[in-house]
Image (cartoon, rainbow, N blue to C red):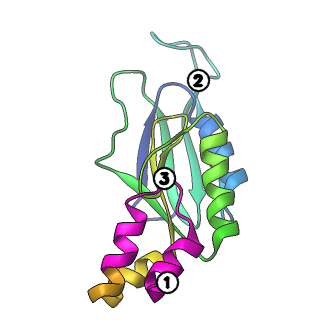
Amino acid sequence: MADKLVTVLWFDGDAEDAARFYADTFPDSLVGPIFRAPSDFPSGQKGDALTVEFTVLGRAFSGLNGGDMFKPNESVSFMVITEDQAETDRYWNAIVGHGGQESACGWCKDKWGFNWQITPRTLLESQAAGGEEARRAFETMMTMQKIDVAAIDAARKGD
């Protein structure tokens, strides 16, 4: 991996499955080298994946199969900025439909416990606009799980 900064995600033995799911779900994504155990070890066997290098939306990650002692939580999330409802639906439905969970305000959790914010660009633009437009869009967003782009756009206009 040539990147100078790589985010390492801790998994309980299924980093390879997660990397393949992410690569299949998001463009500009791939599974790279997999370092496998050269011999048996206390919590695994020769050939088990120890680390998996992968790229999601052009960003480098390494999945570490470290065991069950650490779990992801909401203090870290991945924000994916989407351009329209179709893209929002595609990512949300892939994550939630593959063993994940819906949350509020565009957040969902994948089956490995990692948190995602599937965020339409219009929502970010509404907040940057400030004032009443931001308030209306924010209050509309607060009622949602998956973001409804048309509802945010209507709120921005005051409809």
Crowd around label 3: few <14 · some 14–19 · many ≥20 (10 Å) = some
Looking at the picture, does residue 135 appear above or below residue 2?
A: below
Magenta-drawn segment: 135-159
The spot of residue 122 in percent (x, y) is 50, 80
Of callouts 1 and 2, which one flags the residue occurring earlier in the amino acid sequence?
2
To which residue does mark 1 refer? 159
Amino acid identity at mark 1 = Asp
Asked if labels 2 and 3 touch by Cβ distance under 8 angstroms, the answer is no
In the image, 5 versus 142, the foreground residue is: 142
The magenta stretch spans residue 155 = yes
Whether residue 32 is visible to the viewer of this picture, yes or no, is no
Residue at 65% from the left image edge and 35% from the top image edge: 17
Residue at 66% from the left image edge and 38% from the top image edge: 98
* Figure quadrant of residue 156: bottom left
The magenta stretch spans residue 139 = yes
Rendered image: mark on residue 38: 2
To which residue does mark 3 refer? 145
Front disc: 1 or 3? 1
Looking at the picture, does residue 36 appear above or below residue 147?
A: above
- The CA span between labels 1 and 2 is 62 Å
Main SS, magenta residues: helix
Report helix, strand or loop for mark 1.
loop
Amino acid identity at mark 2 = Pro
Residue at 56% from the left image edge and 38% from the top image edge: 100
Rendered image: mark on residue 146: none
The spot of residue 72 in percent (x, y) is 37, 37
- The CA span between labels 1 and 3 is 21 Å
